[in-house]
Image (tube, helix red, strand yellow):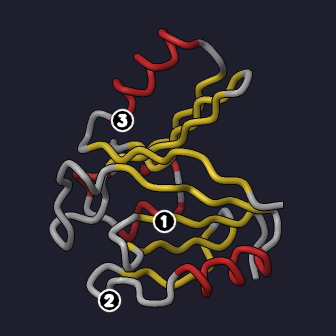
Amino acid sequence: MLRATPFLLFDGDCAEAMTFYHACIGGELTLTKLADTPMKDAFPAEKHSRIINAQLVGGGIDISGTDWMASPDLEPLLGNMSAIFVTSESADEIKDVFDRLSQGARSDWFQPLHEMPFGMYGQFFDRFGVQWIFRSAEPR
């Protein structure tokens, strides 16, 4: 089953922001640093202390986030620091929706679905300028 939640992108202060939100609204907060994942080798050492995945869940609240990892390819600007985060247990379901929504997507910032340690992952800005991020729990 598809699920969509807000996804916030920060420029090095994800842990601080998500900790603040947690203090304000409660729930359970999970923070994962890039250095604690196998993906760290794909990034320069100065990014290893950044948060690669944050999730605040409780009651009807589910907010995910990360620190910006794309620089200098894409600089964080107000307007591109939030996204719709679409998740599913099924890689096939994610691929189907990804393929349909990405028609006409911006080609300058398009990451096709690919396998990551946590499942399938991909992202793009659609033809209306909305950023979409996709993740499935299972690999393809």
Q: Residues within 10 Å of mark 2 (few under 14, many from 20)?
A: few
- The residue that label 3 is drawn on is 14
Q: Which mark is residue 132?
A: 1
Q: Tell me, yes or no, whether the two marked residues, 3 and 2, touch with CB atoms within 8 Å.
A: no
Q: Which quarter of the rendering shows the C terminus?
A: bottom right
> Residue at point 45% right, 50% down?
52
The number of numbered discs placed on residues in the rendered structure image is 3
Residue 99 coordinates in the image, percent (x, y): 61, 87
Residue 68 coordinates in the image, percent (x, y): 30, 53
Q: Tell me, yes or no, whether the two marked residues, 2 and 1, touch with CB atoms within 8 Å.
A: no
Residue 127 coordinates in the image, percent (x, y): 37, 79
Q: Residues within 10 Å of mark 1 (few under 14, many from 20)?
A: many
Circle 1: residue type: Trp
Q: Earlier in the sequence, mark 2 or mark 1?
A: 2
- The residue that label 2 is drawn on is 107
Q: Nearer the viewer, mark 3 or mark 2?
A: 2
Q: Is residue 138 rendered to the left or right of residue 119?
A: right
Circle 3: residue type: Cys
Q: Say above or below: 1 vs 101.
A: above
Q: Which mark is residue 34?
A: none
Q: Say above or below: 84 vs 42.
A: above
Element assignment for label 3: helix
Circle 2: residue type: Ser
Element assignment for label 2: loop
